[in-house]
Image (spheres, rainbow, N blue to C red):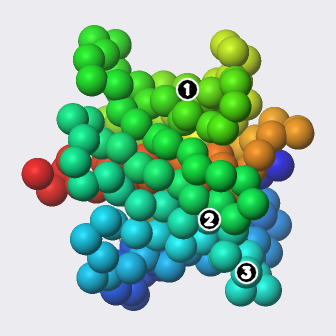
Amino acid sequence: MRYVIREKFFHLGEDSQITDENGRPVYEVDGKVLSLHNTLVMRDMSGQEVATIKRHLIALTPTYTIERPGVGETEVRKHFINLLGDHYTIDVPGPDDLEIDGNLFEHDYRIRRGGAVVATVSKRWIALTDTYGVETAAGQDDVTILASILALDLAEDRERRE
């Protein structure tokens, strides 16, 4: 499946819209402006909450929790030391964690499970707002993948500001 994550141009916080490849809205993302935890709430088009993303306040590296009703918690965390670019782990409930690797400078990422690519992400440079193209393999948990990309974007923005 192909998605586009587009940050809203006029917004307070990290509001975004996620559309399918045909431009139809699939999810709305509400960034909580005054949240200490850098919280994002992801909702489907009927308004049902599908995921909440929160930054850990105390962690050695950027770490975010994704809470999903009925699914449990997923943790996205940056590896402490990595000489070959940025590397994140998506610790999902149960086995088969996901790995994000790529280069933040080039805005090009791959998400792998057991060495197999399950999603690719690219960020367009020529846009007034942050825009990501995401392609997921069939049979994947697209909500967790999309929420992880939003967490990675929060981490990147925070590192840029610091």
Q: Is residue 103 left or right of residue 46?
A: left
Please, what secondary structure does the residue beneath circle 1 have? strand
Relative vertical location of residue 30 with respect to residue 130 in this rendering, above or below: below
Look at the picture and state if 18 lies above or below 143. below
Image point (61%, 29%), residue name? 98
Residue at image mark 1? 99
Q: Amino acid at mark 1?
A: Glu
The reply to whether dot 1 and dot 2 touch (C-beta < 8 Å) is: no
Distance of label 1 from label 2 (alpha carbons): 19 Å
Q: Nearer the viewer, mark 1 or mark 2?
A: 2
Secondary structure, mark 3, is loop
> Of helix, strand and loop, which one carries label 2?
strand
Q: Nearer the viewer, residue 87 or 8?
A: 87
Q: Which residue is mark 2?
A: 51
Q: Which residue is mark 3?
A: 48
Which residue does the image show at 25% across and 71% down from the upper left? Answer: 36
With 130 as the anchor, is 58 left or right in this view? left
Mark 2 crowd level (few <14, some 14–19, many ≥20, 10 Å Cα): many
Give the distance between the C-alpha atoms of the residues marked 1 and 3, in whole angstroms: 28 Å
| Rendered view: 70 above or below 34 | above
Report x, y in % for residue 143.
Answer: 70, 55
Q: Residue at x 39, y 86 (%)?
A: 11
